[in-house]
Amino acid sequence: ALYERSCLLCHARPESGAPLTGQASAWAPRLARGLDALVASSRQGLGGMPAMGLCAECSDADLRALIEFMSSKENTP
């Protein structure tokens, strides 16, 4: 539900420039920075992504779970 409300709009649209959900190759360089760095970027905002990635109610644990979900090659939106 959090993904559908907060992430789907950008992470399922190639034209957004965001790494697509389930596209492991797009996430690999980001994951190389480490999950803590990705959570911090999500919390603060980065590039075109607003702070908290449109999920004002998300905790760091929620953001981590969303990143893990989106970066997994087994997932499809």
Image: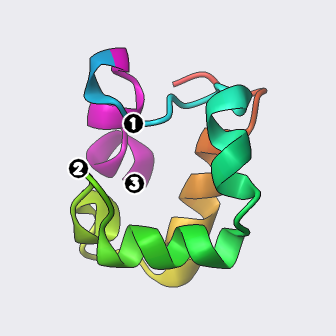
Badge 1 marks a residue whose secondary structure is loop
Q: Which mark is residue 59?
A: none
Badge 3 marks a residue whose secondary structure is helix
The magenta region covers: 1-14
Front residue of 19 and 55 = 19
Residue 17 percent coordinates (x, y) = 34, 30
Which colour scheme appears in the figure? rainbow
Residue drawn 44% across the image and 71% down it:
41
Residue 33 percent coordinates (x, y) = 70, 65
Q: Which corner quadrant of the image does residue 70 belong to?
A: top right
Question: Residue 1, relative to residue 63: is it above or below?
Answer: above
For the question of whether residue 75 can be seen, the reply is: no
Front residue of 57 and 48 = 48
Residue 40 percent coordinates (x, y) = 49, 79
How far separated are the C-alphas under marks 2 and 1? 8 Å
Check disc 1 and report the residue beneath it.
18
Badge 2 marks a residue whose secondary structure is loop
For the question of whether residue 30 can be seen, the reply is: yes
Check disc 2 and report the residue beneath it.
48
Provide the major secondary structure of the magenta segment: helix
Q: Amino acid at mark 1?
A: Ala
How far separated are the C-alphas under marks 3 and 1? 17 Å
The answer to whether the residues at label 2 and label 1 have Cβ atoms under 8 Å apart is: yes
Is 13 in the magenta?
A: yes
**Residue 15 in the figure: left or right of residue 41:** left
Chain-order first, disc 2 or disc 1: 1
**Residue 25 in the figure: left or right of residue 9:** right
Question: How many other residues sit within 10 Å of disc 3, few (<14), some (14-19) or many (≥20)?
Answer: some
Check disc 3 and report the residue beneath it.
2
